[in-house]
Amino acid sequence: MKKDFIFSSESVTEGHPDKLCDQISDAIVDHFLQQDPFSSVIAECAVSTAIVFIAARFSSSAHIDFSSVARNVINQVGYDRHDFSSKTCSIVTSLKELPPDDYRVFNEREMTEEEIDLVPVKNQVTSFGFACNQTTAMMPYPIWLAQKLSRKLSSVRFQKILPYLAPDGKTQVAIEYKSGVPYRIYSITIVASQHQSERHGGPSINKLRSDIRDGVIDAVFADEELVPDSSTKIFINPEGAFVTGGPSVHSGLTGRKNAIDTYGEYSRHSGAALSGKDPTRIDRVGAYAARYAAKNVIAAGLAEQCEVQLSYSIGQSRPVSIQVETFGTGKISDETIASIIERHFDFRIAGILRQFNLRYLPLQIKGGFFRKLASYGHVGRMDIGLPWEQTDKAQLLA
C-alpha cells in the first residue's frame, strides 16, 4: 500500500437486513449455550419482505423456540411497522437435529495440556487478526469511525432524540493518510432511513440532514482528535429521503458483512461468516485468537501494524502455519514476532475455548453474549469487555 492514500470503510446499524440476520443467528447460538454449554449449532438466517427463513443444524440437550427467538430480536431492533413487524412476519424453519457428537463434549476446563493437544479442529480455515496504533482500540481509523457513527445513529433513535428514524442505516468514512498516518477526514456518508415521507408527516430532507449533522456527526467527533475540516465532504442521504428501509426494501443474509465485522477491509479476513456458529468452530474463534495476538504485539511496542495469519487443517489441533506481517513497521523481524507469539499464545481449539471461556459467556452475561457481537464488530469493541481485546500479554512479549 502507498504511504499517501485515501481509505474508506463502512458500517451499518443493527436494523440493516444482513445485521438483523446475524443477530437472529447469534441469539440462537446464545440460547443453545445458555441451556447446554456443550451444544453444537450452526444457524443461518435470511430475510426478505415479510418472511424470515431460519436454517439450523444442531446437537444439544437444549430446547429452543426458534420462531420466538427471531421475533424477540426483530422486536428489540425496532421493526414494528406494517411493512415488517415481529408480530406479523412469517417465519419458516428448516431444522435438523444431529446425533450426539462426542467431540463437542470435551471439557477444556478439566483437561491436561496433553489432552488439549489431542482435540483436533473439525473444519479448515485461514483466519486473520489485525491491530495497529491508529486508535486507542488498536483498530484502523476508518472502520473505527464508521462503527462509532452507526452506533450513534442507532442511539439517537432508541433514545428518541430523533424518533422519526427507522432501524436501517449505514455509514461510511474515508480517511486521507499521509506517510501511512491518518491525516484528515476526507469524507463522511450517512444514509438513514425514516418511518414516513415528508408528505405523510415525516421530516423534510433538510431537517433530517441538519438533525443528523448535529446529533450524530458533531456528537461523535466531539471527542476525536481528528475532526472534519472545511474541505471534508459530508453526504447525508445524498439521494434524498430513504423511507422505511429494512427487509421490506432489500433482503438480508447471515454472514454477508464480514468486512464490517472485522477491519473494514483495511486488513484481510477469512471470508467465513463469524455469526451463527458455536465456539467449537475454528473459523469463528480463530479470528478472535488471531486478533488477540496481533493486539498484544502492538501493545508491546513490537510494531505499528500487525497482521497475524493462522492456517488450520482438519484433524490437527494446532495451526499448520502461523504468519506475521508488520508492513515494514516491526521493531524486530516478522519471523521473530511469529516465533514469539507461537510460544506465548495457545491457538489450539480447546485452548482458545479455555482462554476466553467461550462456552459459558452466554450464560454469564445478561442478554447473551454472541448476539452482542453481531452488530458493530466482533473485534475492536471497547464496550462489552471482550476477552480477545485484552492486552494482558503485552509486557510478556516486550
Image (cartoon, rainbow, N blue to C red):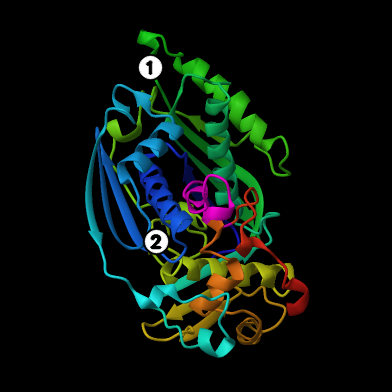
Residue 375 falls inside the magenta stretch: yes
| Label 1 sits on residue | 196
Residue visible at 56% across and 20% down in the picture: 210
Note whether residue 146 is visible. Answer: yes
Mark 1 residue crowding within 10 angstroms, few (<14) / some (14–19) / many (20+) = some
* Main SS category, magenta section: loop
**Placement of the C terminus among the 4 image quadrants:** bottom right
SS class of the residue under badge 1?
Answer: loop
User: Relative to the observer, which residue lies in front, 145 or 105?
Assistant: 105
Horizontal arrangement in the rendering, residue 161 relative to residue 332 (left or right):
left
Which amino acid, by three-letter code, is at mark 2? Lys
Q: Residue furthest bottom?
A: 114
Res. 99 image quadrant? bottom left
Badge number at residue 326: none
Q: Is residue 58 above or below residue 90?
A: below
> How many numbered marks, from 0 up?
2
Q: Is residue 58 above or below residue 65?
A: below
| Label 2 sits on residue | 277
Horizontal and vertical percent position of residue 322:
52, 82
Horizontal arrangement in the rendering, residue 381 relative to residue 195 (left or right):
right
Residue 250 falls inside the magenta stretch: no
Q: Is residue 102 above or below residue 187?
A: below
Note whether residue 398 is visible. Answer: no
User: Relative to the observer, which residue lies in front, 310 or 141?
Assistant: 310
Residue visible at 57% across and 31% down in the picture: 155
Q: Which residues are magenta?
A: 362-379
1 or 2: tag closer to the N-terminus: 1
